[in-house]
């Protein structure tokens, strides 16, 4: 049942990501440029200790929205929604402070995007 629910959430998230470009975190540098992290792909996690496996892309953008750099790499991460909330990148597990404010930590914002599905 949990896998079915997660698959449904991913479908809803994928639809909303397509509509909203998939950006889940942006941070500004030197006032004129910003770096955005986006969800490119997502699916139920292969590891049963996690809920989602995702691919993250990175873009550098100027104040006017012009993309200066688009990282061609596939940065894979796994996300655990339940306690202890965790984002794993490569083999490093990062604890997620679920009480953090949005836009203060990319790991929190990734977790929030996937694990706090909107109520219908």
Image (cartoon, rainbow, N blue to C red):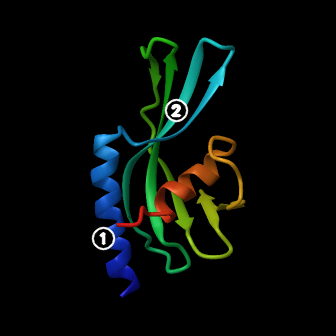
User: Where does the C terminus fall, quadrant-wise?
Assistant: bottom left
- Label 1 Cα neighbours within 10 Å, binned few <14 / some 14-19 / many ≥20: few
User: Where does the N terminus fall, quadrant-wise?
Assistant: bottom left
User: Which residue lies under the disc numbered 2?
Assistant: 36
Residue drawn 66% across the image and 20% down it? 29
Q: Is 16 in front, or is 30?
A: 16
Element under disc 2 = strand
Above or below, comparing residue 42 to residue 60 in the picture: below
Above or below, comparing residue 99 to residue 2 in the picture: above
Q: Viewer-nearest of labels 1 and 2?
A: 1
Residue drawn 30% across the image and 70% down it? 8
33 horizontally vs 69: left or right: right
Residue drawn 66% across the image and 76% down it? 83
Residue 87 in the image, given as x and y percentages of width and height: 61, 60
Residue drawn 35% across the image and 77% down it? 5
Above or below, comparing residue 27 to residue 40 in the picture: above
User: Which residue lies under the disc numbered 1?
Assistant: 8
Element under disc 1 = helix
Q: How many marks?
A: 2
Above or below, comparing residue 94 to residue 27 in the picture: below
Residue 106 in the image, given as x and y percentages of width and height: 62, 45
Q: CA distance from mark 1 to mark 2?
A: 26 Å
């Amino acid at each position: 049942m949990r896998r079915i629910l997660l698959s449904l959430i991913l479908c809803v998230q994928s639809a909303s990501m397509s509509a909203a470009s998939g950006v889940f975190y942006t941070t500004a540098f030197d006032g004129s440029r910003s770096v955005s992290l986006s969800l490119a792909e997502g699916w139920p996690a292969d590891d049963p200790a996690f809920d989602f496996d995702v691919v993250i892309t990175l873009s550098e953008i100027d104040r006017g929205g012009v993309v200066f750099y688009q990282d061609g790499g596939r940065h894979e991460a796994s996300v655990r929604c339940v306690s202890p909330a965790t984002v794993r990148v490569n083999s490093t597990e990062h604890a997620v402070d679920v009480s953090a404010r949005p836009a203060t930590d990319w790991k929190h914002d990734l977790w929030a995007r996937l694990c706090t599905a909107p109520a219908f």
